Amino acid sequence: MLAWRDIEDVEAGGSEIHAANVARLWAEAGLDVTMRASHAQGQPPTVDRDGYHVIRRAGRYLVFPRAVGSELAGRHGERDALVEIWNGMPFFSPLWATGPRAVWLHHVHAEMWRMVLPPNLARIGDTIESRIAPLIYRRSQLVTLSDSSRDELIDHLGFRADRVSVVPPGIHPRFVPGPEGSRSPTPLVVAAGRFMPVKRFDRLIREVAAVREHIADVQLVIIGSGFERVALTQLVDDLDATSWVTFAGQVDDDTLVELYQRAWVVASTSAREGWGMTITEAAACGTPAVATDISGHRDALDHGVTGLLGSADGTIRGELEKVLGDDELRAKLAANARNRAERFTWEATAVGTLDALIVDAQRRHRRTSSPRA
């Protein structure tokens, strides 16, 4: 498995959680799994974790050529199959890899390039993703997380429909409803994610500030860390919001579950998501969601059933007011969210992603065994 980052990286997110869970379950099933990723701050270069081997070498950019070079030199041993996790910049595996191969592509990055890179580098990234890579990967077996993300891969990047399969992420069994009385006595909005421009936590803070004009006792807790923390802290100071905005930082699993259980609603104003794992994790805890109407969110959240979708631009104040201000609606959404969350398991994700490798292996076998004219 070739990945940009490992789960123990300080900037690890949903993609890394997804890869770690699938690798763990494949290893439990008896597969010999090696994951190659970039250096993780404060972590050793190699480690055996949850039954699979992890190699973490090279920086954010050099990991791509060095990982490919190691594969070509056979330093990771003989492999029967390859999984490439295409997270922004690809490893270009169709140009050098042989044997069964699958590519995980969670979503199109599009405007994300301009959010995180200088203009020249952003143009290069966008050109590679939208024009160059689709030509190179046109015969690859791709796996994405949601039907709406699949539509984008087909409509925006031009991939063939029969080459793109959908396998939703799972939910860990730890995410369960809290005991009676665990819900916050006052309206509480919880959000989680890396403090990156694409997550638009600044917009969320402003949206909750607007909600407080009608529901004065609303509190907001934001879980996570990242380089935008300084700017977000300044925004909270400028809005005189320190009394109702809490930055919880990186929290352990038990604290995350407790915050989901206490929340009245989980919110996301993200501009791009392959799915929206915070939405389904909170749903398993019996907490509805309000989120932007974007690919990924449209599948993680069933609009009007498990939560509400606002505008794609991040305007969700009206939907937040509806959920926070209507006890009957909130209870209905919460019950539906809990029931729907039961269908998502990491075991199903592990099987579904392995199926993509099997499909590619079968296609290669048919091609090599078909009689020549």
Image (cartoon, rainbow, N blue to C red):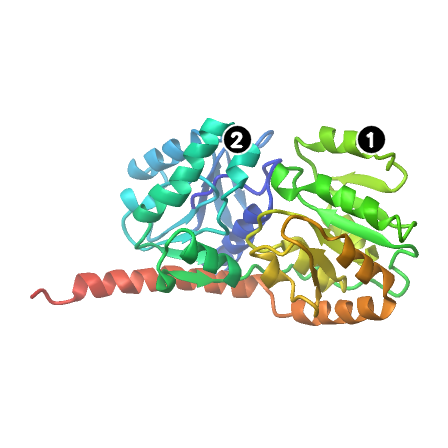
Q: Is residue 289 above or below residue 222?
A: below
Numbered circle sitting on residue 358: none
> Could you tell me if residue 5 is visible in this image?
no
Q: Residues within 10 Å of mark 2 (few under 14, many from 20)?
A: few
Give coordinates of residue 371: x percent, y percent.
11, 67
Residue on which disc 1 sits = 238
Q: Is residue 200 above or below residue 230?
A: below
- Write down the quadrant of residue 306 in the picture: bottom right
Determine the CA span between mark 2 and mark 1. 26 Å
Q: Is residue 101 left or right of residue 31?
A: left
Q: Is residue 116 above or below residue 267?
A: above
Amino acid tagged 2: Leu
Give coordinates of residue 152: x percent, y percent.
47, 55
Q: Residue at x 38, y 39 (%)?
A: 128
Numbered circle sitting on residue 117: 2
Amino acid tagged 1: Asp
Tell whether label 1 touches label 2 (CB within 8 Å).
no
Q: Is label 2 or label 1 in front?
A: 1
Judge by depth and name the residue closer to the eye, 352 or 215. Answer: 215
Give coordinates of residue 63: x percent, y percent.
43, 33
Judged from the image, the secondary structure of the residue bearing numbered disc 2 is: loop
> Could you tell me if residue 113 is visible in this image?
yes
In the picture as drawn, the residue positioned furthest to the left comes out as 373
Chain-order first, disc 2 or disc 1? 2
Judged from the image, the secondary structure of the residue bearing numbered disc 1 is: helix
Give coordinates of residue 324: x percent, y percent.
84, 59
- Write down the quadrant of residue 243 in the picture: top right
> Looking at the rendering, in which quadrant would you find the C terminus?
bottom left
Q: Residue at x 56, y 56 (%)?
A: 295
